Amino acid sequence: MAVVFDADFTSTRQWTAGRSSAYPQMGPTNRGDHKLDFLSRAYCPGGVFAATRRRGSDLWTCNLLTTEGSPEGFQVRTGDVLGAEVTLPVELGAWPAIWTWRDGGNEVDVFEYHPDNPDLLEISNHVRGGYRYWHGAAAGIAPGATFRLRTVFGAQSVDWFVDDTLIHADRRGVGPGWHAYLIVNMSVSDGTYHDRPPVLGPPRLSWVCHGLWVER
């Protein structure tokens, strides 16, 4: 396999900043998904995805980059392998994610994370159903941890790996003709299912995607 996409989180050709059809009216808010996001049009040097409190509001200015609508318009497709190296956030309310989206769906969650569940990675295949909440304390999953992810988008099974260890094979897959755009972002939880940021807590939340690539 060869690398067909190597992320540069400052590239205006690879990414669109602060707009996604996964958000109502392309954003900037998505309260219906229990998010306190107000999307920023900023790019993310060094792969740092952040959220900053907005004055006079409970919303947070949040980074979101997507290949949807970008000049290159890259899409992952059946058979591709996505790799990433990430450092998790430590602040309550932070909600980092790498996922896919197209035409109101086609969503596969490479990972989601909430520091109030400190050793838990959430992984999901919304294309054909199925998910796993993986407890990775033994593998070092915790706020501030750095590790590698690998996701194989197979027709018959989507397989997730952490540091080369298989953590879930869903035996459902995405089908032979699947394709979707990439999204990398920081959201902020509104408190419905996960802790929201404390009122007197830090004014900025962040996580790092040190690298992201797709092999085909």
Image (cartoon, helix red, strand yellow):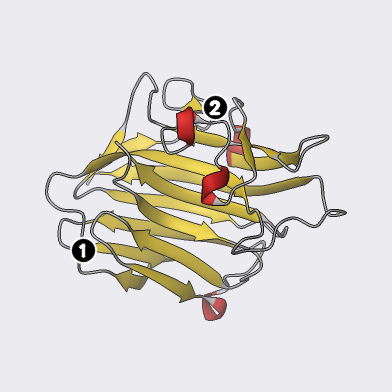
Closest to the observer, 207 or 170: 170
**Kind of residue indicated by mark 1:** Ser
Numbered mark located on residue 157 in the image: 1
- Give the CA separation, mark 2 to mark 1: 32 Å
| Towards the viewer: 81 or 15 | 15
Which class describes the residues within 10 Å of circle 1: few (<14), some (14-19), or many (20+)?
some
Q: Residue at x 62, y 29 (%)?
A: 40
Counting from the top left corner in percent of width and height, residue 146 is at 58, 60
Relative side of 147 to 42, left or right: left
Q: Residue at x 39, y 51 (%)?
A: 83
Residue 78 place in picture, x, y as percent: 19, 48
Seen at 36% across and 67% down, the residue is 131
Q: Does the image show residue 3? A: no
Image height of 196 relative to 46, above or below: below
Q: Position of residue 72 (x, y in %)?
A: 34, 22
User: Of helix, strand and loop, which one carries label 2?
Assistant: loop
Looking at the image, which residue sits at the far left? Answer: 176
Which quarter of the picture shows residue 54?
top right
Q: Residue at x 38, y 29 (%)?
A: 68
Residue 186 image-quadrant placement: top right
Which residue position holds label 2? Answer: 10
